Image: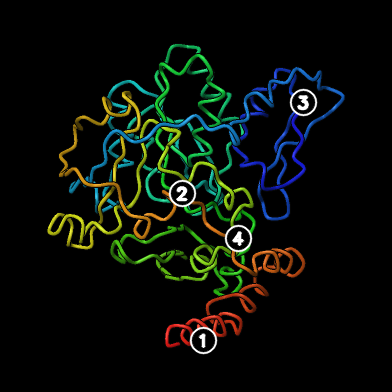
Amino acid sequence: MIRITDRELCCGCSACADCCPHGAITMKADAMGFRYPSVDESLCVDCGICEKVCAFHKPDSAAADTCEAIRFPDLMDESQSGGLAYALMRKAICNGFIVYGAAVDDDFCVRHRRVDSMDGLAPLRLSKYVQSDMKGIPAQVLEDLRNGRKVLFTGTPCQCAGIASAAGKMLRNLLTADIICHGVPSPSVWKGYLESMERRHAKKISSVVFRDPSLGWHGHREAICFGNEKVVSDEYTFFFYQHLMLRPSCTVCPFASLHRVSDITMADCWGVEKILPGFADDNRGCSVLFANTKAGLDFTRDFPDGCSRAPMEIPSEKDQANLYSPSSAHKRAKSFENTYIRKGYDVVLHRFGIQSRSHRIDEFIKKVKRHI
């Protein structure tokens, strides 16, 4: 029977819940919106399948065979990087795959979904800086694999590891593509942020973009639309990059490594300007592509969409920190969480936000240290 005694020990991939043959496990959200398995002991027969399928502490990984900078000019206007994720999904659909990826639903919650046509891919585009809900997804993937369908699953490394572990001997038709992950932020804080924005603007939100492409590749701020009015903000982004609201397991992530759990790894190709001068100097974006397995290498050998690509060295830790180690929690992350749970979003914005006294003190201390 799976028991989570420490929140750092579970990534919330939902594989254990969907693989339980007795329906004894449900994923329940904590106060921060992070989901954890809850076992109904009256249904559990101690078969051990849930523990066997948990991949969080036994990653099966491989070093990347190739590393390339890659960009798709025709796809980049509506992408936040070089368009690689969308190009992978388009190629998969063209080759008869079922595609799984994260999408923003009508209630602005982020959930993984199944897509079997080109028309369904649009919601899977663009980054989502919040942990996605995987409820029912492992079961759907397994059903597709049992039916002989080829599947491309895209997600965080821990989600890909959970799906691959659940697939077991059916891996032949499963292709996984992960991201170099900074950590997943709190779904509850995301919801609190949107509710606060609606209160302050006295309007209902019509759409959201976590990272507005119109600001350029290096601009990272969220765009909240109220009908025809767009508000660009960095409130939520600031909390994310300060590591104030990451899932506890993200700070001990075993997948933040050069050895990857997926067939393909992708990310923004930060530092490309100095690694490959002239390749991507227009601030429109560039992706980095790792082919970690033969299946990944074969699938990414060519694309139907025109692209520019160039081999490159493995990025340095300075450019891709989470390719080497997990993010560390902010020293006030626990205080942030406790305050949010007790008093809500507006209070943490005041106490921990970019204009807060605590942040100004931190910045002053950093400035002093730089001049010592």
Tag 2 secondary structure: loop
Q: Which mark is residue 364?
A: 1
Within 10 angstroms of label 2, few (less than 14), some, or many (20 or more) residues? Answer: many
Q: Amino acid at mark 3?
A: Ala
Foreground residue, 162 or 102? Answer: 162
Measured Cα–Cα span from mark 1 to mark 3:
52 Å
Mark 1 or mark 2: which is in front? 1
Q: Earlier in the sequence, mark 4 or mark 1?
A: 4
What residue is disc 4 on?
Answer: 245
Write the residue at 48% across / 42% down: 156
Q: Residue at x 74, y 23 (%)?
A: 23
SS of the residue under disc 3: loop
Query: Which amino acid, mark 4?
Result: Met
Q: Position of residue 1 (x, y in %)?
A: 77, 27
**Counting residues from the N terminus, which is met first, the one under dot 2 or under dot 4?**
2
Which-is-in-front pick, marks 4 and 1? 1
The vertical placement of 265 against 324, above or below, is above
Kind of residue at badge 1: Phe
State yes or no: discs 4 and 3 in contact (Cβ < 8 Å): no
Query: Where is the C terminus found, in terms of image quarters?
Result: bottom left
- Circle 3 is placed at which residue position? 24
Q: How is the image coloured?
A: rainbow
Mark 3 or mark 2, which is nearer to you?
2
Tag shown at residue 181: 2
Give the Cα separation between the discs numbered 1 and 2: 29 Å
Which circle's residue, 3 or 2, is located before the other in the chain?
3
Q: Are marks 1 and 2 in contact (CB under 8 Å)?
A: no
Count the marks: how many?
Answer: 4
